[in-house]
Amino acid sequence: MSGKIKSKKGYSRLTVALAAGVIIALIAGYILGSLGKVPESNYYSLQQQYQNLTALVQNLTASVQAQKIRAAFIYVGPVGDYGWTNAHDVARRYVQNLFPWLETFYVESVSAADAPAVIDSLIAQKKVNVVFTTSFDFMDATVEEAKKHPDVIFFHCSGYKRDKNLGTYFAELYQLYYLNGLMAGALTKTNKIGYVGAYPTPEVIRHINAFALGVKAVNPNAKVYVRWLMAWYNPDGARQAAQALVSEGVDAIAYTEDSPAIIQFAEEQYKTTGKMIYVFSHYSPMYDYGPDVVVSGELVNWGVIYEDILMKIKEGVYNNTNLQNVDYWWMLKEGAVELGAKFGMPINPKFVNALKGKFVQDPTLGNISIYDLIFVRLNQMSEETVTFDPFTGPIKAQNGTVMIPTGVRAGHDTLWSLNWFVDNVVGSPTG
Amino acid sequence: MRVKLEKRVQISKYEIIAVRIASIVLALLSIGLLFIVSGIDPFYAYSVILSGVFGSTFGISEVIVKSIPIGLCSLGLSLAYTAKVWNIGSDGQLIMGAIFATWVALFSNFPQVLILPSMFLAGFIGGLVWATVPAFLKSKYNVNEVIVTLMMNYISLNLLDYLLSGPWRGHGVFNYPITDEFPKFARLPSIPGTRIHYPTLILLILLTFLILFVMNRTKFGLEIKAMGDNLEAARISGIDTFKNSLIVMMISGGLAGIAGVGEAAGIQYRLIRNISPGYGYSAIIPAWIGGFNPVVVLVASLFVSALFVGGNIAKVSLGLSYGLINVFNGVILIFLISSEYLVGYRVRIEWT
């Protein structure tokens, strides 16, 4: 049994309690053993102290148990995928190790139809008091369950419905896609850049637009060609889409799909034919799949978000009545996302010189190398007061209409519901 | 030593039941071994799963919730399979049912009282129309219906994608590929405290007995049984096999369509891409286990649903991975399907 219950802390607490018990027993044993030498008055005071100590330990254990947070994570995919669910599970394990008062549970590969039943049984059997649902698919189910269990705190990832005991959270990548776009625009030789998208959701459209805006900032002649997969996980489809793009002359590809298939494809091309396709890894650290072709990518760190939420629940900042307006939309500034294909490596060293050797004329920064520009932008977006945003007007849609006027920075709601492509994207935003 | 298989001349009902029960017991024993290998006490695991599924109104109600779509699809498949028309397209037909019903719910402007009945009718027609294509190709040009029905599942999924990311994308959904929620009058009522949308459940039970009646008490039922026994002989004896296989396929599709209505109007209250987590495929199993007998198929649907619910409970209570759950379910079903063979044959071991 022991290996199967996913509640490490439950055991370490048991260990602590056992250790405490052993120590007390040793002390008591020592005291009792040396009774003969102790005067009777001392014996009674020692016994009194021993009893006090025991009571204290019991009280402490009880109060720790009482304040314990039991959090459940509902995943849409298997924890062993190479993307979304894995990233959430890495974060779950991170908070599990961080907080001694936290016990976590997870259920993987849950369908939208099963979500309510799974949540009900977690609450009934595992007595969880915090539930994280980590897929847009679970939105309606989470809203219903939050109504049904008013004492339980719910957080739904990637949705927009909230309630008094239901908050929302999201780690957003568009700033990184913009930086990846700067690199792609600088490196491409054919001025044709590809993007393989999962689904035409506002999130993916936002990422494609940010990527295209980055491309445009350094290379106004380049275009971004979009292919849709209509699946979040489809390695074969992703590979075919990449192949099709390359056969049309594309030499740089970014994508949204939960596997390293496109990176493996590019690495193979490089190894077998010497053909260079610049690729950008998505979501998980994928550098090792294509050290010759991966330029950079987007990395996510859900851990900081879970840490903040759980900490605030523990401290009583969040409770089951005040989450109506709690919406995490965390990016670079908060450390929820990171630039690169590997933590700690924003740009593959192999491509640093190429980026240092290309220059662009910026209205405020003057003549600046692409490499320096990337880091200026990265810093501007990481500061406490963000001084640069990719979605600052003028931004035109494909048909030439100005969607974001000059000088205006698009707000959360605009970005949250994008359904149009910027003007250097080729393809349809409806799939 | 020689192992011989002998065809059974006569099989009593009790023998069939005994073989089925024996196969389930054997399956549970084999899975017990798997539990032991994974470091779990099998008795503990089974008791947790059984008490989870049958020991609470929650577990039982969830089994019923799942058996509604599985049962409806399975019922239709039994009818088609009786006539040896191999419909593998229930999932697509279910999706078409959900699509047609969604049109009624969101875009029809019918009077409110007529909405729910119209949704059921539309869903039935949606599934029926979708099944007509392979049925027609099969009857008229002898195109293999297994391939066509299977392929049409993907077409329906892509049609669903198109509608959700295009014309039917909701207005209040921040451009996510889902429709708006159905208005209150387009939602099916459920038994309080559960997710059982009882109008669909009642429909399932009525249809089960209706199909039972059709199969056993009508000329049509006799004809499709004859077709199942020997198509050529049935044709020569004057049975309109073209018309009959068209009809069984269409009814089969229509019933799957009704399952789609139940999922959209009784569970999700809107159209989403994952409207079916593969119910149409799962439904093939109870149709076989139940030997195409509507009432037995209904019971088998409950059994298969219980397996799925038990799997979810095992995920939560025992912390099993989904892969292991799928293995367990697979083992049980393989044992059951294999026992099909042993119903017809007797194993005799000769010690010489």
Image: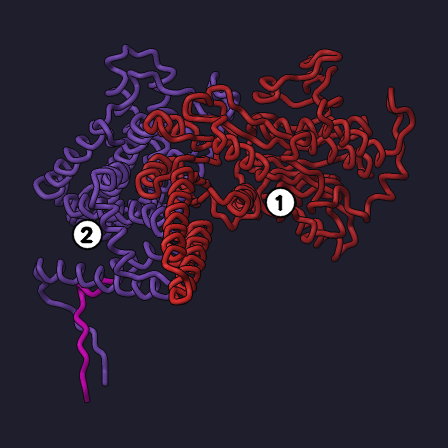
Chain colours: A red, B purple
Is B119 displayed left or right of A164 in the figure?
Answer: left
Disc 1 packing (10 Å; few <14; some 14–19; many ≥20): many
* Residue extending furthest toward the bottom: B352
The residue labelled by disc 1 is A284
The image's mark for residue B291 is: 2
- Residue A320 screen position, x and y as percent: 41, 25
Q: Which residue is rendered at x = 67% and y = 48% of the image?
A: A263
Looking at the rendering, in which quadrant would you find the C terminus of chain A?
A: top right
User: In this rendering, does residue B76 appear at all?
Assistant: no
Q: Nearer the viewer, mark 2 or mark 1?
A: 1
Question: In the rendered image of this protein, does residue B1 appear above or below residue B35?
Answer: below
- Residue B254 screen position, x and y as percent: 27, 33
Looking at the rendering, in which quadrant would you find the N terminus of chain A?
A: bottom left
The image's mark for residue A167 is: none
Quadrant for residue A343, please give it. top right
Q: Which residue is rendered at x = 24% and y = 27% of the image?
A: B190
Quadrant for residue A206, please give it. top right
- Part of the protein shown in magenta: B338-352
How many marks overall? Answer: 2
- Residue A391 screen position, x and y as percent: 70, 21
The residue type indicated by label 2 comes to Gly
Quadrant for residue A130, please give it. top left
Q: Nearer the viewer, residue B43 or A320?
A: A320
Give SS at disc 2.
loop
Q: Which residue is rendered at x = 38% and y = 15% of the image?
A: B107
Give SS at disc 1.
loop
Question: In the rendered image of this protein, does residue B137 appear above or below residue A217?
Answer: below
Disc 2 packing (10 Å; few <14; some 14–19; many ≥20): some
- The stretch drawn in magenta includes residue B103: no
